[in-house]
Amino acid sequence: MGSLQLKSIRKAYGSHEVLKGIDLEVKDGEFVIFVGPSGCGKSTLLRTIAGLEDATSGSVQIDGTEVGHVAPAKRGIAMVFQSYALYPHLSVKDNMGLGLKQAGAPKAEIEDKVGKAANMLSLDPYLARRPAELSGGQRQRVAIGRAIVREPKLFLFDEPLSNLDAALRVNTRLEIARLHRSLKATMIYVTHDQVEAMTLADKIVVLNAGQIEQIGSPMDLYNRPANVFVAGFIGSPQMNFIEGARLGDVKAKTIGIRPEHMALSRESGDWKGKVVHVEHLGADTIVYIDSEQVGTITVRLFGEHRYAPDDIVYATPTVGAMHRFGDDDRVLA
Ligand SMILES: Nc1ncnc2c1ncn2[C@@H]1O[C@H](COP(=O)(O)OP(=O)(O)OP(=O)(O)O)[C@@H](O)[C@H]1O
């Protein structure tokens, strides 16, 4: 079991309020990801759940029990950090088994659990090595293995992949997804990489300046952003924003259209413009256009296209794909 309930969590450092009343329910077995811009309070929230920080006010419950005054080691959680935090003088095996050893577990049980975790993470060949003799990706797997052997109620991950190179990030991401499925464990994960958030999460929590902007499944956030902030934060390249007045919409202050929800033509279409830059990404082509009517917009086309700077083009939004936001930046019904 590993459910989590946060109620009105506030955290201030002096007069600087970093978390401004966070309410969140995490169900047993869920994979929840906190995303948001740098400094929005993601790590502080995770550390508050772990007990490494005390909330200024509010309640943290794990499996229905208030843990606000329970020491981190007694909360039934395991945390995996970006920095791995492995002991350099211990072997991989001893690093993974240390928590159990300190808790007084019998040797046979430690052997068994470390063996299973090592197997799950393909770490068997490295058990006798020390951390310095491993790659970054292998070290991070050891840190994850160390968390697994403790069989925690909650796994907390603080940007675990951010020290890895791009290819390794993808592999380790897949491994974490597989691990989540096989362990059926509750995982809470902080990242500012929205691809990680979109691919791993059952539920994404978008934070901004210490507050939750929206909670939803990845596709909820992508298809139905509640406000301009979420619309602009989720999706890459970013959603285009156009003043409603420019499109003759008197109710909407802002209209959003995703780059992939537009067609481009050399002959005709809704918005005439001039190509200013083209990015050929192989699978996609990103075209930046200056349009007198709607300003600078980004269009994402599937496949290879031979547009070039100074080409005159017409962009046409897909019917029904526009998002309308009101004066308060919230989506209009
Ligand atoms: N110990 C501290 N004392 C004072 N201010 C702090 C402390 N720890 C964090 N802060 C401030 O709290 C705010 C939130 O920090 P936090 O690390 O939670 O952000 P974050 O969303 O995880 O950012 P990042 O993505 O850059 O890691 C920041 O403005 C930070 O400067």
Image (cartoon, rainbow, N blue to C red):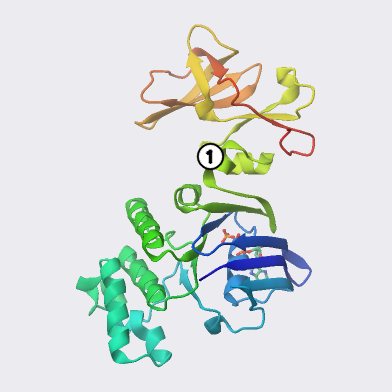
Please indicate whether residue 224 sits to the left or right of residue 187 in the image.
right
| Residue 91 in view (yes/no) | no
Q: Is residue 30 above or below residue 322?
A: below
Please indicate whether residue 314 sits to the left or right of residue 177 in the image.
right
Residue at position x 66%, y 72% in the image: 60
Residue at position x 49%, y 17% in the image: 264
| Residue 146 in view (yes/no) | yes
Pointer 1 local density, CA inside 10 Å: few below 14, some 14–19, many at least 20: some
Q: Quadrant of ligand 1?
A: bottom right
> Residue most toward the left?
125
Residue nearest the observer in this picture, 27 or 101: 27
Count the labels in the image.
1
Residue nearest the observer in this picture, 310 or 297: 297
Q: Is residue 118 above or below residue 211?
A: below
> Residue most toward the top?
267
Residue nearest the observer in this picture, 304 or 235: 235
Q: Is mark 1 within 8 Å of ligand 1?
A: no
Amino acid type at circle 1 is Gly
Image position, residue 54 (x, y; %) = 67, 77
Image position, residue 74 (x, y; %) = 54, 84
Image position, residue 205 (x, y; %) = 60, 54
Residue that carries the numbered disc 1 in the rendered image? 235
Image position, residue 168 (x, y; %) = 33, 55
Quadrant where the C terminus is found in the figure = top right
- SS class, disc 1: loop
Q: Is residue 41 above or below residue 127?
A: above
Q: Is residue 312 above or below residue 58?
A: above
